[in-house]
Image (cartoon, helix red, strand yellow):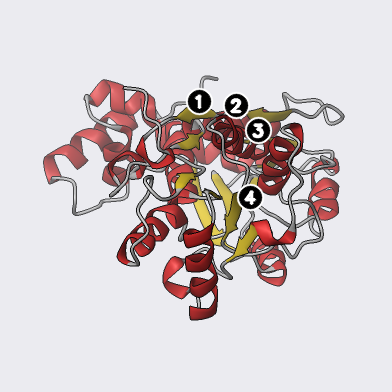
């Protein structure tokens, strides 16, 4: 039997999928007339009984658990929005928990999702500690997809941005502009014991150019939130800004306030210092100094991860075959690097 989705109802009513979802939940944001029309179409299409019957027979709840490293990152919240929208199109709702890069919090999040009997898990993590547990869940037939990549990939399906290549391209561009002293600026040093993919890409570009990176070529700010960076780290950032040629900053959400901070202290980007970054967030091209940065197709990453998860839920993917998809980066040259190709 064909499974009716929110998209089917939306097409027949002539409204958005989000409107259908809200109408079925009796949201006051939707007019009474629209709610009534949506429910009539849902009834005509046998939507409620189809989905309830499916849940009873297959013991499914129609929910998916999403565990993110944090919810303050604009990049991750954008990805979460794409995931939620695509799940709604496929008749699922989503629970979200942030681990805040805390291993114990991540373990609790997994336990909570399982206790709520979600039909599958999508996990964005920097930790290797929980991977064996996720592998065990997958081996037992429970659907799991990662939004993270690792040096040694576990036996799990994964779709993620190729951060190594992104950082490599961003650093290589500065080298091609003639810079030899390129400072790696990051929110916090990785404490997981595994190689930071962004640093791997940065280092690879330097070594290809015959440059040996040293400890004096890195600046660790102690937080990915610039407003929480301590004075000592700000002082180090300012000293390097005055003495060095170029910065590779590991995320746009740090690069934008850093450029503003340097400007207030008399250092002009790109006149005095070239800057490249990573992520291509929504404000990257409209910042005080538009950012030269590397971005990824988050819609593709999100949708492909969901497609894999739904195939697992439907039993359409072999238990012993895993997909490892590192999404390719796209480079955006703007004013912050000192060279802008109009």
Q: Which of marks 2 and 3 precedes in the sequence?
A: 3
Residue 108 located left or right of residue 135: left
Q: Mark 3 points at which residue?
A: 165
Q: Which of marks 4 and 3 precedes in the sequence?
A: 4
Q: Which of marks 1 and 2 precedes in the sequence?
A: 1
Identify which residue is drawn at 36% across, 43% down: 284
Identify which residue is drawn at 79% across, 58% down: 130
**Quarter location, residue 138:** top right
Q: Do the residues labelled 2 and 1 touch (CB within 8 Å)?
A: no
Q: Is residue 68 visible?
A: no
Q: Name the residue under label 1.
A: 3
Q: Which of marks 2 and 4 precedes in the sequence?
A: 4
Q: Mark 2 points at which residue?
A: 328
Question: Which is in the foreground here, disc 4 or disc 1?
Answer: 4
Q: Do the residues labelled 1 and 3 touch (CB within 8 Å)?
A: no
| Image height of 172 relative to 238, above or below | above
Q: Decide which of 152, 288 is in the foreground and name it.
A: 288
Q: Quadrant of the N terminus?
A: top right
Q: Mark 4 points at which residue?
A: 124
Give neighbour class at mark 2: few <14, some 14-19, many 20+ (Cα, 10 Å).
some
Separation of residues labelled 3 and 2 (CA atoms): 8 Å
Residue 277 located left or right of residue 144: left
Image x and y of residue 119, in percent: 63, 45
Question: Which is in the foreground here, disc 4 or disc 2?
Answer: 2
- Mark linked to residue 283: none
Separation of residues labelled 2 and 1 (CA atoms): 34 Å
Q: Decide which of 212, 80 is in the foreground and name it.
A: 212
Identify which residue is drawn at 64% across, 35% down: 168
Element class at badge 2: loop
Separation of residues labelled 4 and 2 (CA atoms): 18 Å
Q: Count every numbered label the image shows and give the total.
A: 4
């Amino acid at each position: 039997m064909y499974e009716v989705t929110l998209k089917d109802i939306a097409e027949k009513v002539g409204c958005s999928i989000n409107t259908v979802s809200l109408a079925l939940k009796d949201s006051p944001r939707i007019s009474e007339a629209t709610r009534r029309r949506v429910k009539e179409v849902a009834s005509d299409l046998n939507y409620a009984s189809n989905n309830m019957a499916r849940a009873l027979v297959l013991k499914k709840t129609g929910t998916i658990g999403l565990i993110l490293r944090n919810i303050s990152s604009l990049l991750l919240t954008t990805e979460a929005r794409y995931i939620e929208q695509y799940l709604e199109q496929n008749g699922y709702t989503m629970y979200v928990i942030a681990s805040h890069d805390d291993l114990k919090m991540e373990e609790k999040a997994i336990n909570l999702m399982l206790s709520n009997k979600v039909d599958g898990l999508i996990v964005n993590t920097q930790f290797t500690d929980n991977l064996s547990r996720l592998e065990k869940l997958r081996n037992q037939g429970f659907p799991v997809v990662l939004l993270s990549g690792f040096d040694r990939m576990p036996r799990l399906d994964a779709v993620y941005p190729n951060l190594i290549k992104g950082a490599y391209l961003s650093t290589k561009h500065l080298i091609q502009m003639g810079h030899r002293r390129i400072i790696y600026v990051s929110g916090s040093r990785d404490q997981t014991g595994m190689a930071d993919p962004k640093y791997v890409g940065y280092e690879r570009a330097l070594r290809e150019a015959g440059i040996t990176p040293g400890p004096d070529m890195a600046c660790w700010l102690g937080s990915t939130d610039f407003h929480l960076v301590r004075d000592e780290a700000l002082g180090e950032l300012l000293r390097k800004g005055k003495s060095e040629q170029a910065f590779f900053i590991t995320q746009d959400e740090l690069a934008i306030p850093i450029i503003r901070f340097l400007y207030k202290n008399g250092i002009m980007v790109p006149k005095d210092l070239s800057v490249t970054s990573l992520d291509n967030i929504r404000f990257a091209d409209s910042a005080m100094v538009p950012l030269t940065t590397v971005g990824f197709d988050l819609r593709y990453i999100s949708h492909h991860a969901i497609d894999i998860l739904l195939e697992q839920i439907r039993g359409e993917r072999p238990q012993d075959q895993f997909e490892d998809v590192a999404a390719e980066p796209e480079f955006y040259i703007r004013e912050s690097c000192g060279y802008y190709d109009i």
